[in-house]
Image (cartoon, rainbow, N blue to C red):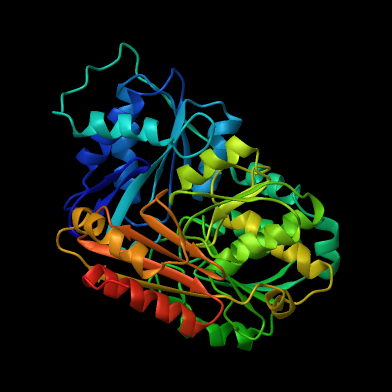
C-alpha cells in the first residue's frame, strides 16, 4: 500500500519515481485546471529534491492549456494560499508531501479563495483524473510564467494579528527547527521582524531531513536537549510545508502538537471572543478553553477542508486541527505555523513563560492506536453496535467514523481509507482512563460485548 498513489479530495501523494512521476503530476494538473474558472494558477513547492521536476511538468501542462502560472518557488503551503487570494488567481497547486518521508511527494490543491478545495470540488478533480486519460489539445496561446514572492504579504498579515511592538520590546530568544523545508522562507523573516534572537536548525530548504519529518514526539525527542542547551524562551518545530507547529518550553519540555491549537485559541479568544471550529479528533483542551471564554466550539469531520467549511458556516474567529495546525482567517484559511508562532510570542511578550502557559491548559490524556481489520470499513460497521454497547453512558455521533462522548472523555473510531486498519483515539482526564477506553474499544472490535 505504501507504494500506491493515494488520491483524495484535497490532493495526491505517492513515491516519486514509482507511483508519482512528472507525467502523473502533469495529468493531475490538467484535471485540476479543467475544473477552474479562467485565470492564472499559482504553483509552489516545499524543499524536497524532486520538487523541481514535478513543478516543471505541472507548469508545462498549465502553460500548454493556455494558463498563466504564478510561480512562488519554494514557499510554505499557507503562503501559496495567500498568493492565490491576493492575486485573484483561479486556483493554486502546492507540490508537497507535507510530513511524509523523503521518498514521497504530492500535490495539494487550492480554490480561488486561497483555501484547500471543498470536498465536492476535490471529488470532481479526482473523477476527472481517474477517468480514461486523454491527451489535452494545446491552447491557441501558451500561458506565461511570472515569478511571485509571497513572503512579504504573508509576514505582513501575520504581524497584523499581534502587538508586534510589544514582542520586539520583549525580544524573545527562539530556537526553531525548519525541518529543511519551506517554512524558513517565512518563519525567519517573521521572527526577525518581531525582534527575536533566533537559533536555527534545518534552515536550508533542501529536503534533506535530519530526522523523520512528522512533528511528533517520537521524531523530535532527540532534539529537545538542544533546545534546553540553547538557553532560549521557546522552541518551535515546523513540518516541511509549514502548516503545522509544535512548541516546547525553554527547558526542552514537550507541550505536544495538540497544545499548539489550544494555546492559539486561548490567545485569540482573550481579545476577540467568537466561535471556534476544530475536527472531531482534536483534543477537548480546545473545547474546554472555548467554554472558559463563553463561546461555542464546533466539531467537524477530520480534514482541513471540513474545518474550513465549518469555520465559514459559523463565521469562526479561529479554528484548526490538533496536529499543530492553526487556521486564523485574518491571515488565510489554511493551517499556518507562522501565525501560530506569532500568537505564542505575543503571550510571552505579556510576561508569561511557555511553561506557565502550558500549566493553564486542561489536564487531559489522549492516546492513539491502530487495530488491524482486514475487512476494513465493512467489518467496522459490524462492530459499531458492540462499541455502542461497550460505552453505555456515551452519546454517539457518526460525523466521521464513530465518536462516543461521555462525561470527562471521548473515543473516536475511524476506518482508514488507505490501509486495512482502524484508527482509535481516546481522551480522558487520566492516562489510566484513556487506556481503559482504548482497551474496551479494542475488545468490542474483536467481538466482545460490553
Relative to 333, say whether 344 is above or below.
Answer: below
Quadrant location, the C terminus: bottom left
Q: Position of residue 417 (x, y in %)?
A: 26, 52
Q: Tally the marks.
A: 0
Left or right of 148, for residue 159: right
Q: Tell me where residue 110 sits by quadrant.
A: top left
Residue 427 or residue 310, whichever sits in front = 427
Whether residue 382 appears in this view of the structure is yes
Q: Tell me where residue 7 sits by quadrant.
A: top left
What residue sits 33% from the left and 58% below the top? Answer: 414
Q: Position of residue 53 (x, y in %)?
A: 29, 46
Relative to 429, say whether 14 is above or below.
Answer: above
Q: Position of residue 261 (x, y in %)?
A: 60, 61
Residue 203 or residue 234, whichever sits in front = 234
Q: Tell me where residue 253 sits by quadrant.
A: bottom right
Quadrant location, the N terminus: bottom left
Left or right of 87, for residue 448: left
Left or right of 249, for residue 101: left
Left or right of 260, for residue 244: left
Whether residue 73 appears in this view of the structure is no
What residue sits 55% from the left and 88% below the top? Answer: 225
Q: Position of residue 186 (x, y in %)?
A: 60, 54
What residue sits 77% from the left and 62% below the top? Answer: 346
Residue 173 or residue 350, whichever sits in front = 350
What residue sits 26% from the left and 40% below the top? Answer: 25
Farthest residue, direction top: 140
Amino acid at each position: 500500500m505504501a507504494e500506491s498513489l493515494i488520491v483524495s479530495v484535497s490532493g495526491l501523494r505517492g513515491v516519486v519515481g514509482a507511483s508519482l512521476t512528472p507525467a502523473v503530476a502533469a495529468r493531475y494538473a490538467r484535471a485540476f485546471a479543467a475544473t477552474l474558472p479562467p485565470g492564472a494558477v499559482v504553483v509552489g513547492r516545499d524543499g524536497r529534491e524532486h520538487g523541481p521536476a514535478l513543478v516543471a511538468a505541472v507548469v508545462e501542462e498549465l502553460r500548454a492549456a493556455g494558463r498563466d502560472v504564478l510561480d512562488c518557488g519554494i514557499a510554505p503551503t499557507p503562503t501559496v494560499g495567500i498568493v492565490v487570494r491576493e492575486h485573484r488567481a483561479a486556483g493554486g497547486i502546492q507540490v508537497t508531501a507535507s510530513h511524509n518521508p523523503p521518498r514521497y511527494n504530492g500535490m495539494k490543491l487550492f480554490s480561488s479563495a486561497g483555501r484547500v478545495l471543498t470536498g465536492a470540488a476535490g471529488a470532481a478533480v479526482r473523477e476527472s483524473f481517474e477517468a480514461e486519460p486523454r491527451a489535452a489539445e494545446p491552447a491557441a496561446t501558451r500561458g506565461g510564467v511570472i515569478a511571485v514572492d509571497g513572503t512579504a504579504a504573508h509576514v505582513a498579515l501575520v504581524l497584523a494579528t499581534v502587538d508586534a511592538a510589544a514582542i520586539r520590546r520583549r525580544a524573545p530568544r527562539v530556537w526553531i527547527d525548519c525541518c529543511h523545508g519551506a517554512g524558513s522562507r517565512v518563519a525567519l523573516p517573521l521572527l526577525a521582524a518581531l525582534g527575536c534572537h533566533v537559533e536555527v536548525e534545518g534552515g536550508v530548504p533542501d529536503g534533506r531531513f535530519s530526522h523523520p519529518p512528522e512533528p511528533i514526539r517520537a521524531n523530535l525527542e532527540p532534539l529537545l536537549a538542544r533546545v534546553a542547551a540553547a538557553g532560549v524562551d521557546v522552541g518551535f518545530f515546523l513540518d516541511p510545508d509549514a502548516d503545522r507547529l509544535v512548541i516546547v518550553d525553554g527547558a526542552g519540555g514537550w507541550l505536544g502538537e495538540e497544545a499548539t491549537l489550544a494555546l492559539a485559541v486561548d490567545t485569540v479568544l482573550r481579545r476577540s471572543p467568537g466561535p471556534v471550529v476544530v475536527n472531531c479528533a482534536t483534543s477537548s483542551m480546545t473545547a474546554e478553553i472555548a467554554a472558559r471564554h463563553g463561546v461555542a466550539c464546533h466539531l467537524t469531520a477530520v480534514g482541513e477542508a471540513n474545518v474550513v467549511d465549518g469555520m465559514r458556516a459559523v463565521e469562526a474567529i479561529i479554528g484548526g486541527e490538533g496536529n499543530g495546525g492553526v487556521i486564523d482567517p485574518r491571515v488565510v484559511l489554511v493551517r499556518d505555523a507562522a501565525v501560530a508562532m506569532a500568537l505564542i510570542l505575543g503571550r510571552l511578550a505579556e510576561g508569561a513563560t511557555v511553561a506557565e502557559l502550558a500549566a493553564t491548559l486542561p489536564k487531559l490524556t489522549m492516546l492513539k492506536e491502530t487495530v488491524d481489520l482486514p475487512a476494513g470499513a465493512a467489518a467496522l460497521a459490524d462492530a459499531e453496535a458492540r462499541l455502542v454497547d461497550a460505552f453505555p453512558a456515551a452519546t454517539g455521533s457518526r460525523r466521521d467514523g464513530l465518536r462516543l462522548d461521555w462525561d470527562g472523555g471521548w473515543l473516536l473510531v475511524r476506518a482508514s481509507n488507505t490501509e486495512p486498519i482502524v484508527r482509535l483515539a481516546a481522551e480522558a482526564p487520566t492516562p489510566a482512563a484513556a487506556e481503559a477506553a482504548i482497551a474496551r474499544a479494542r475488545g468490542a472490535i474483536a467481538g466482545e460485548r460490553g
